[in-house]
Amino acid sequence: MLNLNAADALILVQQHWQITGLISELPSYADRNFKISSPDGTYVFKIANPNWSYADLDIENAALLHLEKTCPDLALPQVIISQQGLHIIPLLLPTSDDISIAEPKNQLCHMRLLTFVEGEVYAKVAQDPTVNLHELETSLGVAIGKLDRGLKDFEHTAMNRFVDWSISNLPTLENEIEHIEDLHLRQLVAHHTKHFAQHEATWKSQLPMAVIHNDANDFNVIVAREAMPISRTNTNKVEVNAIIDFGDMCRHLRVVDLAITIVYALQHADEPKRIQECILSILRGYQAVHPLTQAELLALPALILARLSQSVLMATRAYRKNPENTYIMVSQVGVRRLLKQFDTMGQAPLQALILSVL
């Protein structure tokens, strides 16, 4: 854990960006992130875990700077350049919180400043009964389509780096299959993992490749909404206006970004009819701004099932390493439900549903 308090973080921001204000820490898995509210705007001060290299952060910032030009109608985080003209600044910090250690080891990490994106996370908005889900899901498809369209010509030296959550890593998780306790689920995951391993090379040779966001989960999608007058409607007007957290970016099949988006959105669709409606709404929104080919749409069902399987296997591995963390499996309920529901539906009807957008 990086050893730094909020007061020290604010001093660093003042020194390098000449910005001050009220500071509060944001939740983060391995990094240290602070929200700074100043008279000039709201910012996120990010200090990356030492395991993140300069190149890992540079691809994020380079993508955001690229998208400022190619995707101006999404309210993405903006990179703030320091007084020295830098967008990533090296920093030596102690990494131990143990005060009994007289000289905690300093490690090299890197700090950045981005604008803070206002709005609500998709996970919260999707649970609001006053929200028009068709409007929300269509807007999600449009936003991801715009993002992928904006990234279609983006390249970076780190775009082929190893990323844990790259779907290409699914076959490497095969040893975890035997640890899935639910026999039916184990069989489904084994089948989808094998299918992906057999077809990935062909897909990569035939379908468009691009740098993709790779993590449009329901907490990385930001929604703006506007309450409508009661005399007109009792719902809220909603629009996805931003995607955040570009830390898992990598180069892969363009259609994978859509598969990932659908997987996370479906966590909020319980019934078979709602599952179909959700998929169609997202697809139609995406196709309206960044159309996929028929070949990509044919591959989409298998990629959705592959991503769901990857999620199960990643969680299985994490739980084996940390069985005290029961939340790991609680968060898997929706993923496992979907794999079984898609099995009941059958892949042919799912493929027909997806192709209906052409």
Image (tube, rainbow, N blue to C red):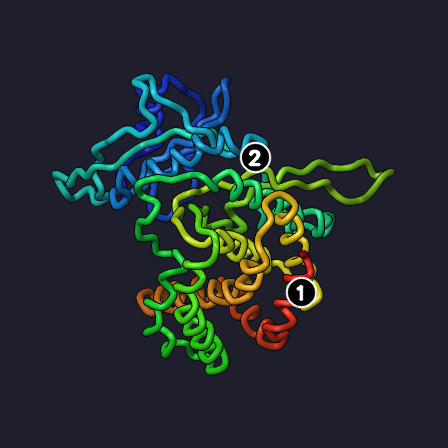
The foreground one among 215 and 12 is 215
10 Å neighbourhood of mark 1: few (<14), some, or many (≥20)? some
10 Å neighbourhood of mark 2: few (<14), some, or many (≥20)? some
Q: Secondary structure beneath disc 2?
A: loop
Q: Nearer the viewer, mark 1 or mark 2?
A: 1
Q: Which residue is mark 2?
A: 74
Q: Is residue 135 left or right of residue 305?
A: right
Q: Quadrant of residue 10?
A: top left
**Which residue ends up furthest to the front in the rendered image?**
206
Label annotation for residue 353:
1
Q: Residue at x 64, y 59 (%)?
A: 279
Q: Position of residue 245 (x, y in %)?
A: 44, 42
Q: Inspect the image, locate mark 1, and give the three-letter code of the amino acid beneath it.
A: Leu
Image quarter of the N terminus: top left
Q: Is residue 223 visible?
A: yes
Q: Inspect the image, locate mark 2, and give the three-letter code of the amino acid beneath it.
A: Leu
Q: Is residue 267 visible?
A: no
Question: Number of labelled discs?
Answer: 2
The foreground one among 25 and 344 is 344
**Which residue ends up furthest to the bottom in the rendered image?**
183
